[in-house]
Image (cartoon, rainbow, N blue to C red):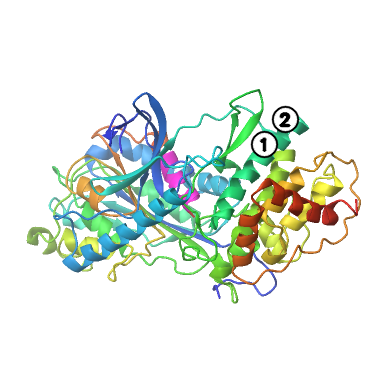
């Protein structure tokens, strides 16, 4: 029996949507970051409208924000991770978290995006309700450092839960048949707004349930691309 | 998949999108002067020799890919475009893999810029009959469409004349009656889903896969007929988010008051809570052959209860057999005569 089956006769389907926004906040992202922040603010309302139009009310919507830069450049401000923030109850906190993101630092390419992706995959995803959608959205204009580089992992602020290689991270993402996956296969989606460089093309090729929108450094996020995020969530539940 | 990319000879001519598609990206494409609709599936992906993952993991992924490909090719084999009754099914013409990804291609259909509710009665009837006839073929083969909704039914001009016909698309969520995909991955739409689909998806106690038969499509047809006649599905009351939820709760659906008595009783029988009590699709086809079946009534009399046509055993096997028998016109007339007793004698 489903966890939410209502004994008083509520037969409505209960949908849970968890979204983790991984946002590159290095200096080169200034223009895209402005778009991402603007879109993120309107995101909860737009999603609710889209879902309602499809006859699908969201029973649980949680958003989480991971801002990342580069452990190789400055380990102290390389990663900012919020908890899952429930909408609408924690909407103020979500908006404050998004507003606090600012572009700066990062040094040269590559950045610590794979660490951010690892933290996103390891999130405490919703496991109840009838249907779940777990979405990670990656916004970056750069390639990523390889995992396991001792120059980064030795930093005091480096997250211990991050796996030591892309292979190990793949195992955590998993496929429909894998036993090591941290995420529920039918529920998970990874949307990448990232350049055609390591590791994004490899991930898009090899990992299931990924949607890849190649980005160009210095260019902003298109409205069309934000529509794709909404569509991915609303259409696939 | 990218704009202008060529995949197995198909050149992608529009920017790929996942709008209205949860499990794929899609775009329009061209090949040999023909226009096509091409889908790129998000899952599964075919592992390469240098792909990530252990040998065991890749073996599991290969096996999953083989099952996925077989499911699609089986449906393609069962539903052949050259079938004499398949004219209004938009069937896959190609299924292939490029690199790590699977693709499926169907002919591009250009829908008419028209709404069914704006058509005259004859036009609406032709539309409904072409939809139901397509389902007769599908159901006779034991296949449940699994995601009937207006978005998957394209209204297009008939080859001859000015009438519109209904082209049924998207068989990706189709399954053999009684053997649906697991609840976590089954397709469908809450607004047109059947009560047994809703219960199965939620994992309700007593909800069985074998209950998901062609009758789930029949429930959707009841709602779709109302949608085509009046622009919206029947009302389902506050507190319920779908017709299936209301029906499960025992709440009546609110039919448009212009709905005539006979067609109203037909729709009530199609949307019965018990999937075994719904007519089979051949009965619907026969009912639509009745003269003036869509004639509206300003005030519909309170309908008497409609007895179920028969109670087949669980699993829908007998229902499937009946549809098989009823696909000939003679059998359809016989079926129609039986249904007329239910629908018109009390009018």
**The label number, if any, that marks residue A42 in the structure image:** none
Instruction: Tell me if label 1 and label 2 are in contact, CB under 8 Å.
Output: yes
The secondary structure that dominates the magenta segment is: helix
Q: Earlier in the sequence, mark 1 or mark 2?
A: 2
Chain at numbered mark 2: B
The quarter holding residue A142 reads: top left
Residue at 13%, 50% in the rendered image: A73
Q: How many marks?
A: 2
Rate crowding at label 1 as few (under 14), some (14 to 19) or many (20 or more) other CA atoms within 10 Å: many
Front-most of B156 and A86? B156
Residue labelled with disc 1: B127
Horizontal side, residue B176 vs residue B290: left or right: left
Q: Are marks 1 and 2 on the same chain?
A: yes
Place of residue A181 in the rendered image (x, y in percent of width and height, measured from the top left):
30, 67
Residue at 37%, 62% in the rendered image: A185
Residue labelled with disc 2: B119
**How far is mark 1 from mark 2, CA to CA?**
9 Å
Q: Residue furthest front?
A: B330
Q: Nearer the viewer, mark 1 or mark 2?
A: 1
Place of residue B121 in the rendered image (x, y in percent of width and height, measured from the top left):
77, 33
**Relative to B116, is B190 above or below?**
below
Front-most of A79 and A111? A111
Place of residue A33 in the rendered image (x, y in percent of width and height, measured from the top left):
33, 40
What secondary structure is found at the residue carrying circle 1? helix
Does the segment drawn in magenta span residue A235?
yes
Horizontal side, residue B271 vs residue B177: left or right: right
The residue stretch that appears in magenta: A226-236
What secondary structure is found at the residue carrying circle 2? loop
Chain at numbered mark 1: B
Front-most of B169 and B227? B169
Place of residue A124 in the rendered image (x, y in percent of width and height, measured from the top left):
38, 67
């Amino acid at each position: 029996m489903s966890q939410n089956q209502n004994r008083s006769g509520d037969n409505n389907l209960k949908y849970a949507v968890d979204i983790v926004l991984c946002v590159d906040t290095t200096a080169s992202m200034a223009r895209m970051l402005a778009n991402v922040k603007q879109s993120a603010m309107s995101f909860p309302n737009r999603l609710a409208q889209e879902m309602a139009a499809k006859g699908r009310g969201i029973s649980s919507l949680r958003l989480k924000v991971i801002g990342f830069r580069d452990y190789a450049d400055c380990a102290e401000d390389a990663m900012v991770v919020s908890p899952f923030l429930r909408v609408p109850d924690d909407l103020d906190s979500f908006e404050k978290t998004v507003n606090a993101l600012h572009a700066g630092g990062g040094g040269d390419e590559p950045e610590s995006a794979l660490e951010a992706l690892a933290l996103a995959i390891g999130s405490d995803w919703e496991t109840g309700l009838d249907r779940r959608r777990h979405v990670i959205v990656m916004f970056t204009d750069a390639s990523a450092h390889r995992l396991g580089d001792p120059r980064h992992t030795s930093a005091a602020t480096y997250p211990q839960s991050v796996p030591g290689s892309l292979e190990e991270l793949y195992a955590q993402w998993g496929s429909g048949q894998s036993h090591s996956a941290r995420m529920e296969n039918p529920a998970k989606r990874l949307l990448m707004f990232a350049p055609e460089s390591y590791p994004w093309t490899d991930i898009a090729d090899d990992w299931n349930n990924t949607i890849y929108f190649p980005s160009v450094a210095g260019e902003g996020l298109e409205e069309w691309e934000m529509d794709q995020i909404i569509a991915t969530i609303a259409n696939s539940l | 998949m990218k704009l202008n990319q060529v995949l197995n000879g198909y050149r992608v001519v529009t920017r790929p999108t996942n709008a209205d598609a949860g499990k794929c990206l899609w775009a329009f494409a061209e090949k040999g002067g023909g226009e096509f609709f091409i889908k790129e599936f998000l899952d599964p992906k075919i592992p390469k020799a240098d792909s990530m993952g252990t040998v065991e993991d890749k073996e599991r992924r290969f096996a999953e890919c083989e099952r996925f490909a077989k499911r699609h090719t089986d449906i393609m084999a069962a539903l052949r475009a050259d079938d004499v009754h398949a004219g209004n099914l938009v069937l896959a013409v190609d299924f292939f893999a490029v690199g790590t990804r699977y693709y499926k291609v169907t002919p591009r259909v250009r829908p008419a810029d028209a709404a069914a509710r704006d058509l005259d009665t004859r036009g609406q009837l032709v539309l409904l009959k072409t939809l139901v006839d397509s389902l007769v073929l599908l159901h006779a083969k034991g296949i449940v469409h699994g995601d009937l909704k207006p978005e998957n039914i394209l209204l297009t001009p008939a080859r001859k004349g000015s009438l519109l016909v209904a082209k049924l698309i998207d068989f990706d969520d189709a399954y053999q009656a009684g053997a649906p995909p697991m609840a976590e991955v089954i397709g469908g739409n809450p607004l047109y889903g059947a009560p047994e689909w809703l219960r199965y998806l939620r994992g309700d106690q007593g909800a069985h896969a074998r209950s998901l038969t062609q009758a789930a499509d029949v429930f959707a047809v009841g709602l779709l007929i109302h949608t085509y006649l009046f622009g919206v599905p029947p009302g389902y009351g506050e507190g319920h988010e779908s017709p299936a939820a209301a029906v499960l709760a025992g709440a009546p659906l609110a039919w448009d008051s212009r709905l005539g008595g006979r067609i109203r009783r037909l729709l009530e029988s199609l949307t019965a809570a018990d999937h075994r009590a719904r007519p089979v699709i051949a009965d619907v086809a026969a009912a639509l052959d009745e003269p003036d079946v869509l004639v509206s009534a300003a005030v519909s009399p309170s309908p008497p209860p409609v007895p179920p046509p028969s109670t087949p055993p669980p699993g829908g096997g007998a229902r499937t057999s009946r549809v098989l028998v009823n696909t000939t016109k003679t059998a359809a007339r016989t079926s129609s005569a039986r249904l007329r007793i239910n629908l018109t004698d009390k009018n």
